[in-house]
Image (cartoon, rainbow, N blue to C red):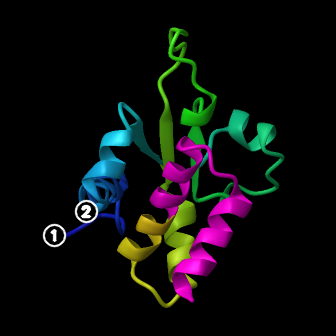
Amino acid sequence: MKHSRPHDLADIEALAAEIFASIPEDLRRRCGNVVFRVEECPDEETKQELNLESPYEILGLYRGVSLDDKSVSETPQDVDMIFLYRAPLLDCWCETEGGLSHLIRHVLIHEIGHHFGFSDADMERIEAEAES
């Protein structure tokens, strides 16, 4: 496959879909109707909201109400979304030894963790336990 630019948005989206399909079915099913979007970089509103000095400070983002905060009686106001940011992902990938799929899998699982209500500290602990 020849690209006018390396790994365009559609390539990252296809990789993310492939990776999501490889996640155990019980976890995928619990993700419900989470929408995945690939964008070049975080938008201005996101950069301001998160106090980012650079759009390259963030690889992905979960937006929504985590499962632990959802009420069965409430009507959802917005769709839960996981954003992956192409340019920061490629920049990070160039600086690491792992493959792009490995990096996207890590970010995707991290953002799914937020959907389940895990904090960054929870996920760091889980990853450290899994590695030992």
Q: How far from the left and from the top, in percent, is residue 65?
A: 60, 29
Residue 40 visible: no
Direction from residue 59 to residue 45 in the image, left or right: right
Q: Residue at the spot x=34%, y=65% of the render?
A: 7
Q: Residue at the spot x=52%, y=19% of the render?
A: 78
Q: Residue at the spot x=66%, y=69% of the render?
A: 124
Q: In which quarter of the image is the N terminus?
A: bottom left
Q: Nearer the viewer, residue 53 or 113?
A: 113
Direction from residue 47 to residue 67 in the image, left or right: left
Q: In which quarter of the image is the C terminus?
A: bottom right
Q: Which mark is residue 1?
A: 1
Q: How far from the left and from the top, in percent, is residue 16?
A: 34, 57
* Spatial separation of the CA atoms under disc 1 and disc 2: 23 Å
| Element on which disc 1 rests | loop
Q: Residue at the spot x=29%, y=59% of the render?
A: 24
Q: Which mark is residue 22?
A: 2
Rendered position, 50 above or below 17? above
Q: Residues within 10 Å of mark 2 (few under 14, many from 20)?
A: few
Residue 118 visible: yes
| Element on which disc 2 rests | helix
Residue at the left extreme of this rendering:
1
Magenta-tinted stretch: 107-132
Q: Nearer the viewer, residue 97 or 105?
A: 105
Direction from residue 99 to residue 124 in the image, left or right: right
